[in-house]
Amino acid sequence: MKKISYLIIFFVLAALNYSCLDQSTIANPSLYELENGAYVRFVTAPPTSFVPEVAQSVSINADLYDANGNVAQYDLSVTANIVSTGETFIAENFITITSFPATLNITAQMIADAINVDLSAFGAGDFIQFTGVATRNDGVKFYGIPPTFDDSNGTIGIGNTESNLLNAIAYQDAMTFDYIVACPIDDTKYVGKYMLTHPVGTCCGGAIFLDQEVELELVSVYQRSFPAIYLEQFAIGNGPIDFTINFICGEVTAADNQNSGLQCANGILFNGSDAPGGYDEVDDSVLVVKFQEACQDCGCAPDEETEIILTKV
């Protein structure tokens, strides 16, 4: 009980400390609504996955709008993880837009040209991520990155867009988005009731999810999700989140940047594993999902590797 009490007190104190910041220094409307930050949204979000057959002919056309009517410039960078080369490429200032509403046009050829890679290198498993910077009409830049604070050296990161604005589907966020070239799995596989067990401890000293029966639901041709409460055993009061699993051409792990529903300062996230496991396309009776618990802002080690086991009921 001491450990549980300590954790509850820790979260309460963190919340109190968070609310005592000097509100006059905060320019993010998601915190105090004192002034509107620069924030760009999609009218309808673009696709998040493409099949390998079209990896070299991907085309995205999506309408954008200035959510708060104060964006002077929107700059988009691209990061491409290309499986065939085993490399990650980054191109800053990939696209710049200076008036809204606007239509965002992106093709695989544009990405290939920006990162100086032959288009023929694009294929299954490639992950393409876009990050925006919205410059407000007074010159203040708003990055498509959550706020961060490193308590080991007292430095504040450049991020100033709250996690809920970047992660909640309802916001149709254009500050950070991505697509993956995935191998579709059968819609009838890895859906339905599963028993969840969590054999590996976490940085917070307990199971991320309690052992329980969950129902896996179809999200897309390469994703499944189930609802569960993070650290439910401590009765902190947070509600369920939809935990999303990615099936990427033979490998399975959690989707990146998933909000856990709890935070000490900046928000605890779930990310994909550096060493993902595999899955069977035919036999969906057991699934081991390896992933990372990113809770370093609570004083934990960064990117703790953990796993859950899902056994079909």
Image (spheres, rainbow, N blue to C red):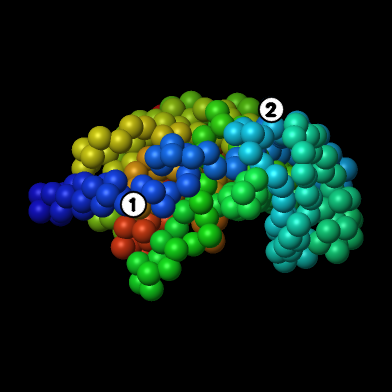
Q: Is residue 231 left or right of residue 99?
A: left
Q: Quadrant of residue 72?
A: top right
Q: Is residue 303 left or right of residue 177?
A: left
Would you say residue 232 is visible in this rendering? yes
Q: Which mark is residue 43?
A: 2
Distance from disc 2 to disc 1, alpha carbons, whole Å, reads: 34 Å
Please state which of residues 122 and 25 is positioned toward the viewer in this rendering: 25
Q: Which mark is residue 109?
A: none
Q: Amino acid at mark 1?
A: Asp
Q: Amino acid at mark 2?
A: Val
Mark 1 is surrounded, within 10 Å at the Cα level, by few (under 14), some (14 to 19) or many (20 or more) other residues, namely: few
Query: At 54% across and 42% down in the image, what residue appears?
Result: 37
Please state which of residues 277 and 240 is positioned toward the viewer in this rendering: 240
Residue 93 percent location from the top left of the image: 76, 57
Q: Secondary structure at mark 1?
A: loop
Residue at numbered disc 1: 22
Farthest-out residue, front: 138
Nearer to us of marks 2 and 1 is 1
Please state which of residues 191 and 298 is positioned toward the viewer in this rendering: 298
